[in-house]
Amino acid sequence: MSNHWTSSKILISVSLVLLLSVIVACGGTAAEPQIIEKEVIVEKEVIKEVPVEKQVVVKEEVIREVIKEVPVEKEVVREIVKEIIKEVPIEIVVERMVVPTAQPARPKAGSLEAYPQAGKNGVPESVGKFTMATDSWGGSDLNPWQLAGTTFLQDLFNLGIMRQHPNGDIAAYWAETFEQTEKGITFKLNPKAKFQDGSPADAQALYDNFIGIGWDYAKYGYDKPSWTSGRTISNVDPEGMKVISPTEIFVATKGPKPIFMWELGGNGYHGWWAGNPATLHKGPKEYLKDPAGGGPFIIAEWDPGVRIVFDRWEDFWADYAWYHKPQYETFEMLTVPDHAARYALLKSKQADFVYNVPWPVAKGIVRSEDSDRGINPGKGDLWTQTYMANGMLVLDFNLPYRLRQSKYPEGRVDKLGVKINHFPFPEGFEKDPTLDSRVRQALNLAIDKRAISKGPHFGMSFPIGSIWHAGSFGARENVVFNPSPFDPEMAKRLLAEAGYSDGFEITGHFGQFAGRPGIPEIVDAVSSYWKDIGVKVTWEEHDPSDFVNGFRFNRLKWTQVSMRTWGRQDHSGREAVLYRPASGYTGVTVPEIADLTFVLQRTTDNDEQLRLIAEIEDKVLALNETFPLYGMTLVMGYTDRVLAHPTVRFSPHFKHLDLITLRD
């Protein structure tokens, strides 16, 4: 192994305090401040119907619109929309419409037999070098007990507990099975599992990793914890954890932990890894001399943040169809942040695979989704496949939220005892137009989301109606793929009713993020659409880190509107904690919503989780302060040498690299 162990570049920095905050929420009993807002309740039922007759009942300051249907002989789904407009003492009838849109296919279960297999049907059993270029691999830390932030390299040489099958289901990996109760999880491990030094990757090794990451890191010379320490401490009860046998361990939890498998178990998100305790116990310096884990690759060369080279571990222990010794002998991964330079490597075939092909380029390359996703279509020198819903983009109006929060006293804590930061309402915005729900709705209705997706996004994004990611646990397809309509005339009427028929000026905020393309194009398009209804917006671009910090711990400082974005989560319960004031990445909320997120975190019953996730989403959307815009996608490009890359349809970043098959 070449000696390239230099100091790591920290691409992502997440503190333990920040991580702990992701699991906490708001409290407080102060009365809610009075602002103009609209509550929207949608119910569905099946009846016999046709024509629509509308009845508007006006009583004092409440306008109630009820849509009644006249029965006929045809069964359809009826949607009843009730709208209650508070504190607006005039008669307003707001029309609503639901516009269907094309829905991306959901991942389907099945074997990998449809993909080219190494050693079968003329596919070589082994090939030489495989080269990949990416915009980022996350953090450059190799030690799983000392990670400064999310990293995608750990999958290649260390162990996760379980793993997503390319069809999206949780599948065997280090653990073959698991059984969860409200007291904890029992894992049964693969008896063949071992580390690259030949020592067994057994239940004691998993136990040692939990203890080392969560509690005993300082004992072995680590001066600070890994970012995975926070989620370990919040989930695992070390006193109740027990090694039952070399292949069985009971991991006690601190009460019911419904998202344990999504945070620590490997179901979707890259969230937790284990290394070889024998080397980890020697301390950080000794570990880096030989970071041999239990994954399918051995690190051969390492230039932090720039280049890493792996050799195939010939004695790799796993033999699952979805996790086994790779076909290629050597794997070179390069970080190339510049889009043009990265694509040039693909076009010149210096790289076999490029992660994150710019949308304007990708639109002209053959898509494997047009035939068999993930399989070389055989129609040219290059081909692509797309990760759907790798990121979320919403429009946030935070002044109503900040007004509510400013009414609460300082010194509050949430239900877990975590401090809720107090921020006063910003001066000069007491009569801001966006405090009026009608204005916020008008600005949303003025945006033609479908046209942006088809135009400046080249069909690579999809308009979304949900605050949850498509394909994630708890996401409802009828909400996800049902974005709000484009209705500029209604937008103008709402502005006029709110007293802004001549429009107004507003300031917006955004940041650009690696792996989250299309944001600048949305900003430009929104400016144009708002101009059409008389609203002039001035956008301010921020460094991504600064932009994210503007949402930390109840700040929501980006006034008056912002393009909030975050990466994919495969369990909507993980995103639900955003809607607590003490969250590390706060979304607009009210105490009722925050309380529901705590209830959600206390049940392992799937049906109850689904019900609560739906209720939280409905209440967030009813505030009319957060408006979903897009599910973002990310395109991967391949040369004709790559025969197949079986991988999940919905993902925040690259996966299943070890399953790629190539020609000689």
Image (tube, rainbow, N blue to C red):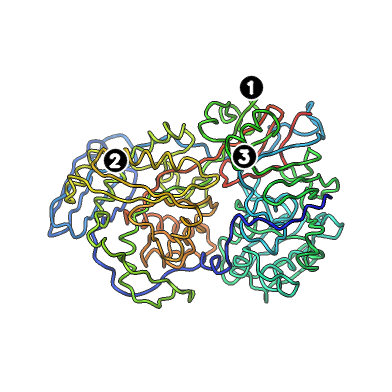
- Residue 277 rendering spot, x and y as whole percentages: 78, 65
**From the viewer's perspective, is 486 left or right of 53?**
right
Residue 116, quarter of the rendered image:
top right
Q: Residue furthest front?
A: 6
- Residue 70 rendering spot, x and y as whole percentages: 22, 40
User: Which quadrant does the C terminus fall into?
Assistant: top right
Asked if the residue under mark 3 is in contact with the one under mark 1, i.e. CB atoms within 8 Å, the reply is no
Residue found at x 56% / y 43%: 650
Q: Which residue is mark 3?
A: 355
- Residue 449 rendering spot, x and y as whole percentages: 37, 38
**From the viewer's perspective, is 649 left or right of 467?**
right
Q: Which residue is mark 1?
A: 380
Q: Looking at the image, is 404 positioned above or below residue 647?
A: below
Specify the amino acid type for callout 1.
Gly
Asked if the residue under mark 2 is in contact with the one under mark 3, i.e. CB atoms within 8 Å, the reply is no
Q: Secondary structure at mark 1?
A: loop
Specify the amino acid type for callout 2.
Met
